Image (cartoon, rainbow, N blue to C red):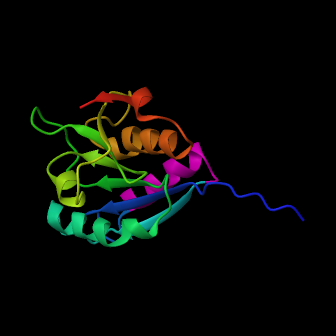
């Protein structure tokens, strides 16, 4: 029997939505709708609201246990402002998708390999639920082997 070694397609979710949130189910459903083969791992949905330190701690404690190519969606405080943009950070062969409100610098213990401003948009839910349409779209692109330059520009 021949064994083929495929790169696992893993997307993790970290949020402050709460463990019984319907938003988590909406994110999971959106990912599965784009690619049913993606494995979704919940890091935590019990992050204190807007607590970037706690979110960064959770990701720093767990990311090293995931294979290269894993995409981590950080779903908290995601409304863009002039100061904070939606970005992708590449670090150690993994990708982090979220609002760059300081959480990326708290996750990285060294300079990131790359940071891209996300330029893709969606007609629906952009202002109210960017995690579902923008972050999921970006995560699915990356976990399927896509490159950040297609969905964004270097920061």
The residue at 39%/67% (across/down) is 64
In the image, residue 94 lies at what x, y percent?
41, 53
Q: In which quarter of the image is residue 82?
A: top left
State whether residue 60 is above or below residue 86: below
Q: Is residue 135 magenta?
A: no
In the image, residue 75 lies at what x, y percent?
30, 54
Q: What stretch is highlighted in magenta?
A: 22-37
State whether residue 119 is above or below residue 15: above
Horizontal side of residue 145 vs 59, given as left or right: right
Dominant SS in magenta: helix
In the image, residue 92 lies at what x, y percent?
38, 54
The residue at 31%/72% (across/down) is 61
Does any portion of residue 146 appear in the rendered image? yes
Which residue is at the front of the view, 55 or 149? Answer: 149
The residue at 57%/43% (across/down) is 144
Which residue is at the front of the view, 110 or 58? Answer: 110
State whether residue 102 is above or below residue 48: above
Residue at the far right: name it.
1
The residue at 25%/63% (across/down) is 16
């Amino acid at each position: 029997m021949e064994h083929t070694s495929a790169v696992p397609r893993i997307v993790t979710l970290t949020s402050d939505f709460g463990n019984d949130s319907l938003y988590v189910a909406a994110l999971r459903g959106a990912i599965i709708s784009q690619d049913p083969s993606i494995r979704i791992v919940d890091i935590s949905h019990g992050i204190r609201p807007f607590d970037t330190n706690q979110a960064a701690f959770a990701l720093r404690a767990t990311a090293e246990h995931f294979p290269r190519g894993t995409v981590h969606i950080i779903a908290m405080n995601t409304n863009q402002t002039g100061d904070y943009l939606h970005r992708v950070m590449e670090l150690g062969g993994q990708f982090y998708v979220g609002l760059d409100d300081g959480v990326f610098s708290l996750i990285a213990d060294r300079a990131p390999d790359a940071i891209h401003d996300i330029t893709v948009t969606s007609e629906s839910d952009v202002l109210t639920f960017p995690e579902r349409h923008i972050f999921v779209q970006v995560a699915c692109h990356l976990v399927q082997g896509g490159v950040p330059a297609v969905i964004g520009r270097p920061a």
